[in-house]
Amino acid sequence: MIKKLSRQFKYILLKFFRIRSSAHSISIGFALGASINFVPSFGMGLLISIAFAKLFRGNTVAAFLGGVSLMGIFPFLFYLNLVTGQFVYPYELGEMIESAVEEAASWQATAAAGFSVGRTFIIGMLINMILFIGSFYLAVYVIFKRYQKQILHLLYVKWVKQ
């Protein structure tokens, strides 16, 4: 299993560094593709990441690989959205749940608690996506502009030539 996983990882990494496109196109594609994992997309994340890459003239292969790269840590990113949003729009979840339970007959209290948590989530999601896209774009751009050929040569010597 580990050997098979490493073989797939090697293939994806080689595919990523073999992309023949501008550093800007690859960077924007990868950043947009990976950032879609902050959004609960209900299984449509890869399609959305490719659509965003096409919309912003990014590389679609890089967007696909970016979307796949962070798929496994979606629960952590979901939680990070709530934590980040709570800095901007603080709430006490325990108190909101207690008030909703006490007023169970009133759907308005339950809806107000849901909207409050939803607003906090969306604010955190937008902040995280903006910060993430900016930082990943810059990192991938520098890597592809300066080190793509060296990394590809290293991967070829280590993995393919053996």
Image (cartoon, helix red, strand yellow):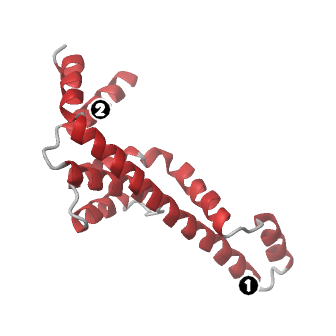
- Secondary structure under tag 2 reads helix
Other residues around mark 1 within 10 Å, as few (<14) / some (14–19) / many (≥20): few
Q: Residue at x 73, y 84 (%)?
A: 107
Q: Is residue 142 left or right of residue 18?
A: right
Give percent across and percent down for residue 78: 55, 56
Nearer-the-camera pick, 114 or 17? 17
According to the image, label 1 marks what residue? 107
Q: Residue at x 78, y 86 (%)?
A: 106
- Secondary structure under tag 1 reads helix
Give percent across and percent down for residue 3: 35, 22
What is the residue that sits farthest to the right in this orientation?
Answer: 102
Q: Residue at x 44, y 61 (%)?
A: 130
Q: Is residue 140 above or below residue 112?
A: above
Q: Is residue 8 above or below residue 70?
A: above
Q: Is residue 10 left or right of residue 105?
A: left
Nearer-the-camera pick, 102 or 140? 140
Q: Is residue 67 visible?
A: no
Q: Is residue 130 visible?
A: yes
Other residues around mark 2 within 10 Å, as few (<14) / some (14–19) / many (≥20): few
Q: Please name the amino acid that badge 2 sits on.
A: Gln
Q: Is residue 74 left or right of residue 45?
A: right
Query: Which circle marks residue 8 in the picture?
Result: 2
Q: Is residue 112 above or below residue 140?
A: below
Give percent across and percent down for residue 135: 41, 50
Q: Residue at x 39, y 56 (%)?
A: 133
Q: Report which quarter residue 81 is drawn in.
A: bottom right
Q: Is residue 72 left or right of residue 47?
A: right
How far apart are labels 1 and 2 at the CA level? 49 Å
